[in-house]
Image (cartoon, grey):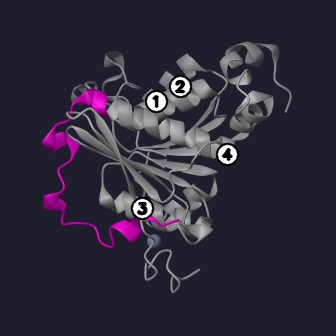
Amino acid sequence: MELTEAQFHRYARHLILDEVGEEGQARLLAARVLVVGAGGLGSPLLLYLAAAGVGTLGVIDDDRVDLTNLQRQIAHATARIGMDKVASARQAVAAINPEIRVETHPIRLDAANVAGLVARYDLVADGSDNFATRYLLTDACCAAGKPLVAAALAPFDGQLSTFKPYLGAGHPCYRCLFREAPPPDLVPRCETAGILGAVAGVVGTLQAVEVLKELLGIGESLSGTLLMYDALGASFHRVKLPKDADCPTCGAGAPR
Ligand SMILES: [Zn+2]
């Protein structure tokens, strides 16, 4: 793919990097990424991936923009309260980079639609806030052999990893960590627990960096490692994630 003159200017600070260059930029422009959730994580994900020139962004969210979202969900705007989040996200992306194709999915991810959606994209970025979605994406991405860059938020903390269990040893999936979802009443969501808004921005931005690294094939993948951010301690922490040989999703006995 030949870059246009406008693209040479827009992506100039990528093009001078040996790790990106024209070939890497062309790869980003050809890439298709599904962003699950257009909320606190999805907002910085969508904005940075659009700015970086990821050519096609799918966005799935069945919610509408609410005034209480705006403290952290920076893809949305006061003037768009009441609008579908996917439509609002499309406008935010277009304002930054009108050449990005946005495929909006104003639906809830479920067992019936997840495989079809995942099949249409090269990589999935999970910015959802619930375990049901996380497990659906874990199983579907493993089965389809697609990288899953997933993050989760707590009021002053975030966690991030990349899952590529189809690569075998050393590459666990989310279910290797947490076999079953905890009971819903043990899992506070942003709506009930609160969150320092900028924490979502840090973690969603880290997630965008990892998505770009996976698309470009540069640096060290987070597959097999959980990166944890503690905002109050101003610290990052990494832990190795073991692969569970008996994992029902990616273990030896898992259905293929
Ligand atoms: Zn697994």
At 35% from the left and 19% from the top, the residue drawn is 77
Q: Which of these two is toward me, 235 or 83?
A: 235
Q: Which of these two is toward me, 108 or 248?
A: 248
As measured in the structure, the alpha-carbon distance from the residue carrying label 1 to the one carrying label 4 is: 27 Å
Q: Residues within 10 Å of mark 1 (few under 14, many from 20)?
A: many
Eye-nearest disc, 2 or 3: 2
Q: Amino acid at mark 3?
A: Asp
Q: Which of these two is toward me, 105 or 119?
A: 119
Label 3 sits on residue: 110
Q: Quadrant of ligand 1?
A: bottom left
Q: Residues within 10 Å of mark 3 (few under 14, many from 20)?
A: few
Q: Mark on residue 89? A: 1
> In this picture, which residue range is highlighted in magenta?
171-199
As measured in the structure, the alpha-carbon distance from the residue carrying label 2 to the one carrying label 1 is: 6 Å
Q: Residue 46, position in %: x, y?
A: 50, 32
In the image, residue 180 sits, relative to residue 90, either above or below, namely: below
Mark 2 and mark 1 in contact? Answer it, CB < 8 Å: yes
Q: Amino acid at mark 1?
A: Ala
Label 2 sits on residue: 93
In the image, residue 173 sits, relative to residue 15, either above or below, namely: below
Q: Amino acid at mark 2?
A: Val
Q: Residue 93, position in %: x, y?
A: 53, 25
- In magenta stretch: residue 144: no
Q: Amino acid at mark 4?
A: Gly
User: What SS does tag 4 mark?
Assistant: loop
As measured in the structure, the alpha-carbon distance from the residue carrying label 2 to the one carrying label 4 is: 24 Å
Q: Mark on residue 217? A: 4
